[in-house]
Amino acid sequence: MSTIPAAGPNASSSLTKPRRKIDAVSIASFIALVVTTFLMLLPLFFMVSTSLKSKKELLKFPPTFLPETWQWSNYKDIFETLNFGQMYANSLIIGILTVVGTLLSSALAAYGFARYRGKGSNLWFMLMLSTMMLPYPAIMIPQFILFSKLNWIDTFLPLIVPAFFGSAYNIFLLRQFFSTLPDELFDAGRIDGCSEFRMWRQIALPLSGPALATVAIFAFIYSWNDLLTPVLYLSSSDKFTLPVGMSSFTSSRFRIPPWHLLMVASVLAMLPIVTLFAIAQKRFVEGIVLTGIK
Amino acid sequence: MKRKRMKKTFALLLATSMLVVLALSGCSGGKSAGDVAPAGDSDTGKSGKSGEQVTITHYTIDSEDRTFIEKLIPDFEAKHPNIKVKVEKAPYEQFDSKLQTLIAGGKSPDVTSHYGYGGFAEYYNKDMLLDMNDIIKEDGFKASDYSIPDDLMKIYTVKDHVYGVPVNMYVTLMLYNKDMFDAANVPYPPSDYEDKSWTFDKMVEDAKKMTHVSDDIAKTQYGVDFTWSERDMRPLYFGVEPYSQDTWTNGGVPSETHFDSPDVMATYNKLFNLILKDKVSPTTEWSKSVAGQNGDAFVTGKLGMTVSGSWSLAGSNDFPFKVGVAAVPAGGNDKVRSVLFVDPLLILKGSKHPKEAFEWIKYLVSDEVQEKSIDLSGGNPPVNTKAAEAYYKHFEGIDPDDVKKVYEGAVKYGFESYNHLITNYSQINDMFINEMQPIDTGHKTVEEVMPTIQKKVMEIIKR
Amino acid sequence: MTHRESRRQTLYMYLFIAPWLIGFLVFALYPILSSLYYSFTDYDIIHPPKYVGLANYQEMFHNDLFWKSVVVTLRYTFISVPIQLLLALGFALLLNQKIPFRGFFRTAMYFPSMVSGVAMSLLWYWIFNPSIGLFNYVLSWFGISGPSWLMSPDYALYALMIMSFWTAGSGMILFLAGLQGVPSSLVEAAKLDGAGRFRIFLNVTLPMISPVLLFQLIMGVIDSFQVFTQAYVMTQGGPNYSTWFYVYNLYTSAFKEYRAGYSSALAWVLLIVVMLFTGLIMKFSNRYVHYEGGGRK
């Protein structure tokens, strides 16, 4: 396996010159970044600020930017209003299993589509893409009938098991990445006597760190914020996920929603995703150095 | 080693798929939908054990003012050891889609109400509801024993068949901002419906004194927001009926509508003139921008009066100003001044245990539970006239006497909301909101828009 | 390719795609075929479906809400997809450089994609508020009195497009991941040849990330043809039908009008149209997309 390059500490930067030269373009782009970042972080500011307001203050017009009195007790109240800990745990279990399942199965299938030119591969690939083109409301009812025949209603299974059979989006994504890997690597692997599965495991996967990290993040966030599927398949309160619980705050047509508590929940719900991302984004920095292969 | 594991995985996957294919072959065609119970259902499993225990499902909205019924279950189950109650919840936005999916999937709940976009008439016309006549006969249920007024029972009775038992009754009332009245030196409006001086014109006059329009939106305030019921029902306030009479007797399918008649258009002009000519009411845009996420501009203290459902009382404690309740002013209709929103409990046709479901319904409308529910729900209005007294006293800062007068007047001069009574109502309502939008902004006149609306209403009803 | 080699390729392809293939047969095929069947029926969810042939498909063409939804959706797709792609690529290029606080910037860019929908919609109500919102406040610095955005039939669709730009962060992540695969040796070689930034981008970087670009273009089209949540939560298809998206129309037909048959027909027309778009893009892209791997040459 000597031909496989190790992950290096240095990312390839396609635009900057090796010596860091500060010029007008860099400064302009830095300023653009700061402005955009400000815009992108507005939701965060808004969430945190609202989460600390009192119920009365929420009714003020014009709305206040910062809370008049910082009501930290909101962060305690959320645990009394909702079965928050349980919901958090449920979401975590579903999210983590979804990520594991998606990574495994999608990486396998994507490799099949990317590296082999078998009979019918184009047909299957188009079929796979087409599964994404039918909107969810159209298959909601038959899918429910299917899962209810399996007796999976009110369990986590409909939310987790399908992930272990690959998601079209992530297969397509990984296939694009696997297709960019140079053939020479695999030829070398074959000469070394690697099995096809080993080449997947020891050549393709290690070289696709950034792509796999992306899939992990996307799969987790999708599962973490998904509302429709858990609403449909879960009926016992102790199985509810975070988005389901949070939606109860805005569900009364007759009451003014407790936005402050909703924002507390949103802030707390965000933490695992931000952590996951902060860790995963390093993968992009420690990209793979392919120098010297060709 | 690794290859072995992979083979094992594949074998497992294959086995699973075979099993599923087998399971699926039992349901080819997808025609089994509503009425066939899938074999191996949890209920059948249970009945094997002790006696005749059954589980019924109550499907409702996942919000505090609906899910409080969970707290009543232990008491009910103690009284009815053979019945278990399970509450199935959905967020408001997904209420309809989940209900329909449950029904289509053969997992129909037993008891529910029209808490989503669709109303009773829709459920009735789609044949979703169980005719309760037989159960009522066998049970000997009498509405009077539960202090439910007869005319409320009639709302969900179609052609002498009972399809729903009323459980909550909201009315339309006027809320006013006492601080704004005080500042403008205007006497408070009366809560007595028999006070003949309280008319629509008087309301406009009062509203003028409180309206201040300024370039600074924070300083702008309006006298009144007259959002009486949904748009299509508003002509009724002035005594004009846009739907033909047979609508109320045949399950909500009007044979005719008159939205393009001069009478109806005159009423809409009167209402839009509050915004466009009298300028005492805000545009929808202003209301929405001031209301922001709360959905109601009145709560910000920028409106003198608003016509609203009695559900607004529940939050009044948090309003940043003093609130009063008043009668809806007389608008020229001697019989109708208030809109009633009576929520029924319904048994779905797909219910496997309608009798037990009816026991649960009876429990929910009993005197004691109706009274208890007021506090548990945070202020849901009971239909039970005995429990009503407790409801009037529920709202801190509002005179119970006023609430009582407003409620009694509203019932006397009340008409059930069209949204419960007319078929395909959510489509009609969507269409009204979209088609009337240009009138609100002054881009089109009532006369230009109403013929289109008339045509579209008829199309929707015929669907 | 020899016959044996071709059989070997086919065998391994099926072995590797087996997880998806089984999942497809087990979990997706039945719902998909059912919806195809429903599309030829009159199905109100309560009663069993009744076969009506092509009636649902014929009705569409006489339904003015259908045509409204088509126009709204096409306008949205053609304007927002290219802009989203450009923004995502731009940010990715910027954040692939060695700049201070890079990790922070990346996280910040991606932030709006991580937040739950309700929190975001609350923010948008405030940003687009005609009288006190951020957008019109900024416009007023330039003496422009802004429109009423979500409440205006002329601007609501643009407001939803602007909202979609906030999630360009996910596209950025994908491009960033793609950019890591660009061998620095190629870039260095181009530099030695005296190529400028733009040349390097055009001749080295762009071809190398073209598979990711293709992916994003196709997914962008698929997703924007299916815009639903924004219209459902923010505008309910209004004002005056200006955000009556295709899938919003489809959802309303199914769950407000109880017409699952008609709604399924809408879904299948969508599938065919999007399939055509995807096919066209793929065909066109064959000339430009560069796959390093030989398997697919």
Image: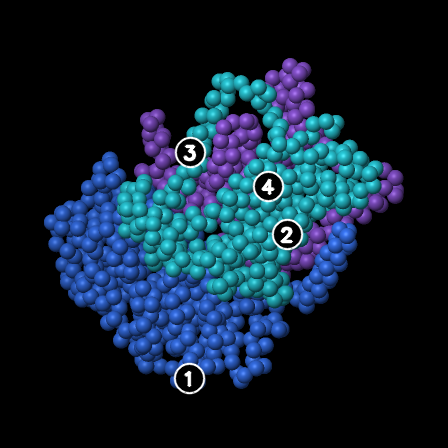
Chain colours: A cyan, B blue, C purple
| Residue C275 location (% of width, % of height) | 64, 43
Q: Which mark is residue B385?
A: none
Provide the chain ID for the residue under circle 2.
A
Dot 2: element: helix
| Residue B29 placement: quadrant | bottom right
The answer to the question of whether label 1 and label 2 lie on touching residues, with beta carbons closer than 8 A, is: no
- Mark sitting earlier along the chain (2/3): 3
**Image spot of residue A94 (x, y percent):** 56, 55
Residue position marked by numbered label 1 in the rendering: B139
- Is disc 2 on the same chain as disc 1? no
Label 2 amino acid? Gly
- The residue wearing badge 4 is A214
Quadrant placement of the C terminus of chain A = top right
Residue pointed to by mark 3: A38
**Kind of residue sitting beneath label 1:** Asp
Are discs 2 and 4 located on one and the same chain?
A: yes
Q: Nearer the viewer, residue B363 or A195?
A: A195
Chain of the residue on which disc 4 is drawn: A
**Circles 3 and 4 on the same chain:** yes
Q: Residue furthest right?
A: C3
Q: CA distance from mark 1 to mark 2?
A: 54 Å
Residue at left 71%, top 47%? Answer: A108
Res. B442 visible in picture: no
How far apart in space, not on screen, are marks 3 and 4 (Cα)? 24 Å
Residue B269 place in picture, x, y as percent: 28, 48
At 42% from the left edge and 84% from the top edge, which residue is drawn? B139
Depicted C227 relative to depicted A250: above or below: above
Name which residue type carries label 3: Phe
Q: Amino acid at mark 4?
A: Thr
Q: Earlier in the sequence, mark 2 or mark 4?
A: 2
Q: Are marks 1 and 4 on the same chain?
A: no
